Amino acid sequence: MVDVVDSATRSRMMSGIRAANTRPELKLRRALHTRGLRFRLHDKSLPGRPDIVLPRWRVVIEVRGCFWHRHQDCRLATKPSTRPDFWEAKFRANVERDKRNVGLLRDAGWRVAIVWECELKARDIDAAANAILTWMQSDEGMLEIPSMARPVGADSALLS
């Protein structure tokens, strides 16, 4: 399928896609800050430069885009119809890099929370922030919102 916009327009559109300070990330940061949490952003000394770093608790929070990071069974994780081989390789590399970075963080003693973009769009941001606070007080090493165990859009409560 031929692209519906010219290459200059496509380039401008793609350059607007951010790796940091995305809307979902800003919403979550605001909610966490309101709850009294203070954090660092995009720490270059940690694998993958996590979005939110809470050194006091040895916690990192990654806000992942469903499209780029391939959120399983999510309606936002579509696949472009043009250049399927390129996109498949790109997505596979992203997922492998995510797994590697989480492993490195866990091996270094960090607890990791992953918050998917669709959750921050579909639900009350306060629910996600409260789930993170509850998780931080537990001994669990990982948190994923929404849990991969439940379908996106299900009415069940957030993973705690």
Image: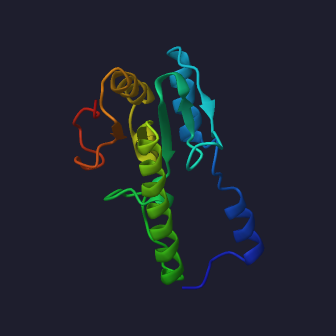
Q: Residue at x 58, y 20 (%)?
A: 38
Query: With 37 as the anchor, is 131 left or right in this view?
Result: left
The percent position of residue 116, horizontal first and vertical second, equals 43, 45
The C terminus lies in quadrant = top left
The N terminus lies in quadrant = bottom right
The percent position of residue 7, horizontal first and vertical second, equals 73, 77
Decide which of 121, 112 is in the foreground and name it. 112
Q: Residue at x 53, y 14 (%)?
A: 36
Decide which of 104, 63 is in the foreground and name it. 104
Total numbered labels: 0
The percent position of residue 110, horizontal first and vertical second, equals 45, 36
Query: With 22 as the anchor, is 123 left or right in this view?
Result: left
What is the residue that sits farthest to the right in this orientation?
8
What is the residue that sits farthest to the top in this orientation?
36
The percent position of residue 60, horizontal first and vertical second, equals 49, 35
The colouring scheme, among rainbow, by chain, secondary structure or one colour, is rainbow
Decide which of 119, 19 is in the foreground and name it. 19
Q: Residue at x 49, y 42 (%)?
A: 62
What is the residue that sits farthest to the bottom in this orientation?
1
The image quarter containing residue 158 is top left
The image quarter containing residue 155 is top left
